[in-house]
């Protein structure tokens, strides 16, 4: 995308797996290189460490943002003393955080991770654009509770159709699942606008068969393209491929 074109905004969602690639190596630099290759303006990242022993106490979101020269906000979904784990929004444009909370729901025994959601506003060439980044849990009941919060009056329920909002993340939800349908009742899935709900599969990178990463938007924004970035570099950098979408401002907004 040509960033001199003020009529377009490119965003991505990318679960970076703690920056540990399919080769077993941790590399924040490699993740930053993949993001740079996307030519995006804003990216929502999931599964990042901050001050954790397993990742050499690195601020992964800050390290990636510094390499890109971007703004960022990290929200910890899980805290263990001083060790944090969560998600981040990175943007080439200034961002202002509006909400950042832990999601409800009791995680299943096989994955005791708590989850989070962040709502930020980016000052883009399209005007103010609200970006909501999240990572849902693995349990079906857990995801339903999380989708219910996301669609509540305090979150998407307060959004009007003429407000530019993009919701993205790893929802651990297939198209047509109950949690997915709850969100789609309030927003358009870019997949369905561009192609079909089952296309653009992002997980796992070794053999992508699942569409669990999603990008939704209000009618104030018109999706013009969507793609899965499946370079050789991206295939190794994480267990998810980045999902990328382009938007223009809707003429009626």
Image (cartoon, rainbow, N blue to C red):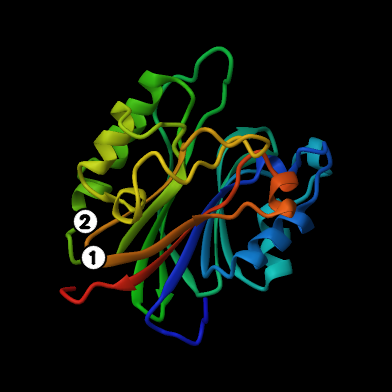
Tell me what residue is drawn at x 35 percent, y 42 percent: 197
Residue 163 is tagged as: 1
Q: Quadrant of residue 248?
A: bottom left
Between residue 225 and residue 102, name the one nearer to us. Answer: 225
Is 8 displayed left or right of 155 in the figure? right
Q: Going by the picture, which residue comes out furthest to the bottom?
A: 4
Q: Is residue 246 above or below residue 168?
A: below
Tell me what residue is drawn at x 37 percent, y 81 percent: 7
Is 68 displayed left or right of 245 in the figure? right
Between residue 83 and residue 72, name the one nearer to us. Answer: 72
**The residue tagged with tag 1: helix, strand or loop?**
loop
Mark 2, residue position: 159
Residue 118 in view in this figure: no
Residue 199 is tagged as: none
Q: Is residue 31 above or below residue 154?
A: below
Q: Is residue 221 above or below residue 239?
A: below
In which quadrant will I find the C terminus? bottom left
Tell me what residue is drawn at x 73 percent, y 68 percent: 67
Residue 215 in view in this figure: yes
Instruction: Say whether marks 2 and 1 touch (CB < 8 Å).
Output: yes
> Crowding near pointer 1: few (<14 within 10 Å), some, many (20+)?
some
Alpha carbon of mark 2 to alpha carbon of mark 1: how far?
7 Å
> Crowding near pointer 2: few (<14 within 10 Å), some, many (20+)?
some
Report x, y in % for residue 37.
Answer: 66, 66
**The residue tagged with tag 2: helix, strand or loop?**
loop
Is 67 displayed left or right of 97 in the figure? right
Report x, y in % for residue 228.
Answer: 54, 52
Is 207 displayed left or right of 154 in the figure? right
């Amino acid at each position: 995308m040509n960033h001199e074109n003020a009529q377009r905004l490119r965003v991505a969602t990318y679960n970076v797996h703690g920056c540990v690639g399919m080769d077993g190596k941790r590399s924040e630099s490699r993740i930053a290189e993949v993001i740079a290759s996307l030519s995006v303006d804003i990216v929502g990242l999931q599964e990042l460490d901050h001050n954790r022993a397993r990742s050499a106490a690195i601020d992964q979101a800050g390290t990636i943002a510094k390499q890109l020269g971007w703004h960022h906000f990290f929200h910890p979904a899980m805290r263990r003393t001083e060790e944090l784990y969560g998600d981040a929004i990175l943007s080439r444009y200034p961002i202002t955080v509006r909400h950042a909370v832990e999601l409800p729901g009791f995680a299943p025994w096989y994955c005791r991770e708590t989850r989070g959601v962040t709502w930020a506003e980016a000052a883009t060439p399209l005007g103010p654009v609200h970006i909501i980044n999240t990572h849902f849990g693995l349990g079906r009941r857990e995801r339903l509770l999380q989708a219910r919060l996301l669609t509540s009056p305090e979150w998407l329920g307060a959004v009007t159709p003429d407000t530019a909002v993009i919701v993205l993340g790893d929802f651990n939800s297939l198209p047509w699942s109950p949690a997915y349908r709850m969100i789609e009742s309030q927003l358009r899935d870019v997949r369905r606008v561009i192609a079909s709900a089952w296309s653009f599969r992002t997980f796992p990178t070794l053999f992508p068969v699942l569409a669990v990463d999603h990008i939704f938007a209000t009618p104030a924004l018109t999706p013009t393209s969507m793609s899965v970035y499946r370079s050789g570099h991206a295939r190794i950098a994480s267990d998810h491929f980045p999902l990328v979408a382009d938007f223009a401002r809707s003429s009626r907004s």
